[in-house]
Amino acid sequence: MSVRVLVTGAAGQIAYSLIPLICRGDVFGPETPITLVLLDIPFMEAVLKGVVMEIHDCAYPLLVEVIATSVEEEGFKGIDAAFLVGALPRREGMERKDLLAANVKIFASQGKALANHSSPNVKVLVVGNPANTNALIALKNASKLSPLNFTAMTRLDQNRAVAQLSLKNNVAVRDIKNVIIWGNHSGTQFPDVSNATASGSKLPFTAHDPALIELVQKRGAAVIAARKLSSAMSAAKAAADHMRDWWQGTSDVVSMGVISDGTKYGAPADVIFSFPVTVDASKQWKIVDGFELDAVAVEKLKITGAELLEERSEALAATSSL
């Protein structure tokens, strides 16, 4: 039996890089058949047809069926995993609160569609920004589903930090562990390398390197400045990494935006906050306890937590007007 996988914003840049990773088995396993569902807005239907043509031309052995649609109910029907990539991008002159208000409509509707049409065990990864609060809005509107079904992507930030450590210390990416992204996928995020190791040994760097923190926080803007387009290849790879670890399990500590109950690391309750997690064989993530936070880290977690509370307030206010 195939795994039914939804990608929204399927005619966009990130999806174009993500779809091959899904179809060739990088995410759900090299022996797992895939039914791929592609959802985008009616305006993008012609582009979506071209994407489907290319998927067919790739002749993926694991791909059982590809379904392209602009109808939300059809897109969310029976899905086991969802990559919610599609979101309204921030445009010139748009305030963050305007972006939140616009995306509330999208993710409130998708939350309801998830509750009404998807598998009760669906794994939902929100990629579209502002990812943490978009995930919260989807969660709030999916009354039949567990909050544990929803996550936001901060793996791109983790991958960026790991790559910089690899370059700085001349060690292999695969050997670096325990790099943590705390909080929001925004400029307030806290990339924490104070616990990082390579092949089990601590790396020789200052625990909280301001240059590294700023580089990771502003990496997305730097890519746009250089490429004149937002991160797509790296975002797709991070989404695939996130869902692979969630679906297949991992004993490595990885960063995921998950629902906070207010009892871990001083994070506020009822926001989607990025924590260090592991995932067991039943596909259940668990926040990892025991990481020590010094005064600098505590302050940075307060800042990113406060931003998430502000975003939640603005987003819920916008929801009430729907």
Image (cartoon, rainbow, N blue to C red):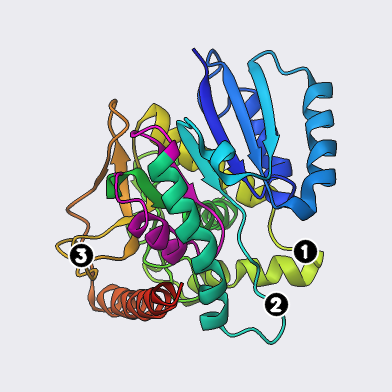
Q: Amino acid at mark 1?
A: Leu
Residue 171 appears in the picture as rendered? no
Residue 284: where, in percent of width, then height? 28, 36
Question: Of residues 207 and 127, which is closer to you in this image?
Answer: 127
Which residue was labeled with disc 2?
91
Question: Of residues 170 and 87, which is closer to you in this image?
Answer: 87
Cα separation, mark 2 vs mark 1, equals 13 Å
- Span colored in magenta: 117-145
Residue 123 lies in the magenta stretch: yes
In the rendered structure, which disc, 2 or 1, sits on the residue that comes first in sequence? 2
Cα separation, mark 3 vs mark 1, equals 35 Å
Which residue was labeled with disc 1?
229
Packing grade of label 3 (10 A; few <14, some 14-19, many >=20) is: some
Q: Could you tell whether 27 is left or right of 122 in the image?
A: right
Residue 123: where, in percent of width, then height? 41, 38
Q: Could you tell whether 77 is left or right of 45 in the image?
A: left
Asked where in the image residue 195 lies, by quadrant, the reply is bottom left
Closer mark to the observer between disc 3 and disc 1: 1
Q: Amino acid at mark 3?
A: Tyr
User: Dot 3: what SS?
Assistant: loop
106 shown above or below 147: below
In the rendered structure, which disc, 3 or 1, sits on the residue that comes first in sequence? 1
In the rendered structure, which disc, 3 or 2, sits on the residue that comes first in sequence? 2
User: Dot 2: what SS?
Assistant: loop
User: Dot 1: what SS?
Assistant: loop
Q: Amino acid at mark 2?
A: Arg
Q: Residue at x 33, y 59 (%)?
A: 140
Q: Residue at x 31, y 52 (%)?
A: 276
Tag of residue 265: 3
Q: Residue furthest left?
A: 263
Residue 251: where, in percent of width, then height? 31, 34
